[in-house]
Image (spheres, coloured by chain):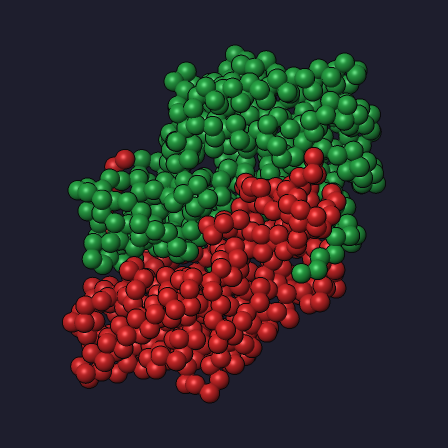
Chain colours: A green, B red
Amino acid sequence: MAIDWTAAEQGSVLKEFRPRRSVPTDWIPAQPGDLLKEIDTPALVVDLDKCEANIAKMMAAVSGTKVRVRPHAKTHKCAELARRQVEAGAVGVCCAKLGEAEAMLAGNVNDVLITNEIVGEAKMRRLARVARGYAPARVGVCVDNIDVARQMAAICASEQVVLDVYLEIDVGQNRAGLTDTKAIVELATLLNGNAAFQFRGLHAYSGLAQHRRGVPERRAAAEAAAVRAAKARDAILAAGVPCEVVTGGGTGTFPYDVRSGVYTEVQPGSYLFMDVDYAKNEQDTQAPQFDVALFVLASVMSLQDGRATLDAGLKAFSTDMGPAQPAFEGWRVRNVSDEHTVLMRSDEGTSIKLGDKALLVASHCDPTVNLHEWIVATRKGRVEAVWPIDARGKMY
Amino acid sequence: MAIDWTAAEQGSVLKEFRPRRSVPTDWIPAQPGDLLKEIDTPALVVDLDKCEANIAKMMAAVSGTKVRVRPHAKTHKCAELARRQVEAGAVGVCCAKLGEAEAMLAGNVNDVLITNEIVGEAKMRRLARVARGYAPARVGVCVDNIDVARQMAAICASEQVVLDVYLEIDVGQNRAGLTDTKAIVELATLLNGNAAFQFRGLHAYSGLAQHRRGVPERRAAAEAAAVRAAKARDAILAAGVPCEVVTGGGTGTFPYDVRSGVYTEVQPGSYLFMDVDYAKNEQDTQAPQFDVALFVLASVMSLQDGRATLDAGLKAFSTDMGPAQPAFEGWRVRNVSDEHTVLMRSDEGTSIKLGDKALLVASHCDPTVNLHEWIVATRKGRVEAVWPIDARGKMY
């Protein structure tokens, strides 16, 4: 297959063509006041008591420190939940993508950091226009390349906007980000000296560290990341460039990031909901214990020979960390396909009838949320509200 | 965790509460006339020449037989592509879910079969109202339980609609569907004798058979399914109940299903796009060879130490059958995370620059399509159209 690898010469983002949009449906999974069993399926359900407790535990964990919390909105993609995090004391949110940031800004979340690089003129220009359009809301972005920085500066200048920029360093993820001290100082100097930018500091996130299973390994990975971040920060400061912020860390490592003396900001996302994968981490008894607050509700659509087929499959929950798991005893997942999960009885436990509703715990909350249009907020078994997943599918 | 397993007592589907919807963004990935490299990323891209050839090959394969093609719309979820399949001779489409069926009906696809059971009063009532609202379009659904059939009949009667119904039998998937001949005849008799239903025949699909790697194993699984379908059909006919349709089969088995003399209709979906997983099947040289027509386009957003980080991860393509694969030589996937794919150079091959666009082949086309809002239709390297994925996320 022949690919033209010429760098994109993208056209204007002021597009003329407006294709037909899908016809929206009126479907919503529930009404306020509904019982859990009355929610239509498949549906994403959050237990508000547990979710609010998770938010409170996170804020308590940084209380008395100078470390701010900037929760990652890629987990929930829901402006209502982002606003609740900010009301509880978060400085703003992280977003993975520009489209996600747009959705949060549109939902009155006024401090957004895009934790990735933006390349290509069209997308840079869109970023600049979003930042200008939502000013005085803060919009930040990561940079790890000097040519990209120069191109972005020119676009921001032409769009008459000043953008918050963060220099991304690689602290163990081995993905994006600089490691070479000379290159870091050179880029920081450029970012700091350009009138199109407000240079905020370092983006220093290691996703791999979050999922190291043992507490000692997780703590060691976090400490190693902090050492690399400190080295980069000190080199920048030594060059006379300010470095106010060092942001990174997540649900798995934030206790160590907070204590590091290096990070000024942590970016936990999954703590809000938790999932099967995070539950596999050895728990640090010194750290806050978060509860699972997110579920996928499914219906038993067929019951044959003792096996129960649910109406939710891998289009209703992500399986990259394994299948979702029943939140009840006596049944195990036999297999998951696009639209179905088949449960088999594993021992004496809950009895299942055709039409029953089953709560499942997602194995990986972020991509599971991304599959749904709505999140049903429940408290003590009743629906309190139904919120749109504003940034669902906004991967661009 | 305590779950209330009482069967759902669902309220009316005429809901009053209308929550705030997400603010739509104006983003579309491309304009007609754009070059491939000008498409914004991540984007879903279809090669129209290849896709149209796949459609033509499928229709040629049933030409001269009495077997109809009812492509599965869960693959593409796009009304425009469904209409093109129907224009090429398909009898209508299959849908996995009621929400998907609504999206197809809204897009002027006038013969839709929901290849699953619908349970719960609220969803049954919605189904009845959709069928009534789009009449004279045909709407069919599967049934595998006599109590569900009775409940559905009562709801259809109260909604004054006659629904196409298919009795689902289990022909090897070991999921939904009846196997016991006595139960099959009893249910068929009820379905055929009820004025709320138009009994069409049997739904006899085995998904497992589609993915058996060897040709002999795949043929054997298809033949075994046909034997079970014939047995059920003959028992129904012997009871004096008509059985006009036997529908099932897919991209992996349709040559054998067509020749079986049992199936009157086949339900291939993936043939339209193909993917890495289907390419792992041993190809039957006697059967049509379909080409990969679907790609995920990503941008190189970071380039460090010879590794290229793309701006598309498992929120842009499904990984349940493994990661998407580069459609070019010299690079391999190191890992995929939520928003990123990291490519490593495997040998001499294509050179990659920051900002370049990379075409990836999805490992599993159906759940990959489901992640996207738009599909960019290209021909000979230029954008011809951009279509909404109408049923994206319509899992309910």
Q: Residue furthest bottom?
A: B64
Q: Is residue B355 left or right of residue B370?
A: right
Q: Is residue B139 left or right of residue B20?
A: left
Q: Is residue A266 visible?
A: yes
Q: Is residue A59 left or right of residue A138?
A: left
Residue B159, quarter of picture:
bottom left
Task: Please name the residue shown 37% across and 58% down the image.
Answer: B14
Q: Where is residue A312 drawn, in percent x and y? A: 37, 52
Residue A247, quarter of picture:
top right
Q: Is residue A83 visible?
A: no
Along the line of sight, which residue is nearer the eye, B288 or A136? B288
Q: Where is residue B38 drawn, in percent x and y? A: 74, 55
Q: Is residue A156 left or right of residue B302?
A: right
Task: Please name the residue shown 49% across and 19% down the image.
Answer: A219
Task: Please name the residue shown 35% across and 79% down the image.
Answer: B260
Residue B304 sits above or below residue B282 on the image: above
